[in-house]
Image (cartoon, grey):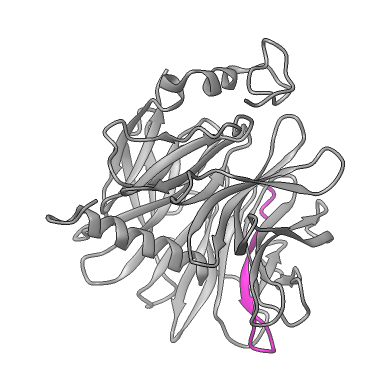
Amino acid sequence: MEKLKRILTGLLIAAMFALPGCGGGGGGGGPSDLDGDGVPNAQDAFPNDAAKFSAFATKQLSPLSGGIFSAAIGINSAMKVIGMSDNGSQQIQGVLWSVAADGTQTDQVRLKPLGSNSYSAAYGINDSGIIVGESSKGSDTVAVWWPSGATASSEPTELLLLSATGPSAAYSINNRGVKVGEALDSNGRMVAVVWRSGDTAPVPLGGLASDATSAAFAVNESMKAVGESEVSAGGAVHAVIWSMDANGVLTDGPTDLGTLSGHLNSTALGVATLPNGKTVIVGESESATGEVHAVMWQEGLLFGYNIVDLGPAGARGSAAAISSLGLIAGFTDTTGSLATVWHAMHSTPVTTNPVFSDSSLGQALGINNAGYLVGISADRAFVAVPTP
């Protein structure tokens, strides 16, 4: 499960840095539309006011009872945060936190695995509060969802598989209830899939080659899904986008989004349709030497997508999520991993803005449309509240 590996690796890196002795203009708009998205609104101050853009008040989110670390991965409009934590018994389990407008934690719910199994993880939540992720099931790991208003006793529902066994995982759910992720096919390959409702079998979205592995990591309200696919079996991996109709039926794609010049691999982790109707995709691009840069793909005026490097030269980074207003959550890594926010409409010249004013190490992994960020800092989940 590539996204799980990415998140847990980031968590372990952040925890390692926390140990003693470890080092650690957008154009096109008029005067009232400063970010160039075609809609004069409160976001217009962000690209032109660095102090406001990077002003966040951060609060920690506690791990499960007995646990020592936690990671927040997504947040919805109702201030429900999902992620994972250890439970003090060397087991990872999904968590649902509720937070107040100032970021203060008001509730915490352990998201049960299937039956008597021990592992679960939550990756996505929609505005109705339906959560998707994965759970252990015997020796397999399978895609599941938890209901809106989940409690500690709520049983997850297993999503149907492509083949007789797992593994599978659901990474994202939109407000239509459409879920995307990956599942093992009958040929033993992990492939990108869409679940059109909780009771239907997954439908493969297709890869860049008939025998390629693939995965879908995000789906938005415009029925755009993004992820990655091998270019050929065993070959390089490129970011891709799929388009679906309102019923979740594939209408276009996968479309190869490419890489930065000279890079070999890329992956798309988030997608948004901005107020101007343009699609923006965020993710990573990896060089031949293994240097990973945060990137975004902007929909072109006529056709295709243009890739933009969001990271400073020589710095590792990732763009993990994007809101419908164009705020991007991720991290940059020069002397340490810094949770970072960008604005999609003001990326040239690139301005990166650390979430933590004291330059605390961390990674931002999720963002909602109100600009609240969630992620990990050292060994704790955090929520970062935009300040006036």
Residue 364 appearing in the image: no
- Point out residue 51 in the picture as x, y percentages from the top left corner: 41, 20
Give the vertical position of 301 relative to 187 (above or below): above
Check residue 296 for magenta coloring: no
- Point out residue 167 in the picture as x, y percentages from the top left corner: 54, 80
Magenta span covers which residues? 176-189
- Point out residue 306 in the picture as x, y percentages from the top left corner: 72, 46
Q: Quadrant of residue 328?
A: top right
Q: Nearer the viewer, residue 291 or 249?
A: 291
| 153 sits left or right of 240 in the view | left
For image coordinates 72% across by 13% down, the residue present is 30
Q: Nearer the viewer, residue 387 or 63?
A: 387
Residue lying farthest to the top in this orientation: 31
Q: Nearer the viewer, residue 280 or 323?
A: 280
Check residue 187 for magenta coloring: yes
For image coordinates 81% across by 51% down, the residue present is 246
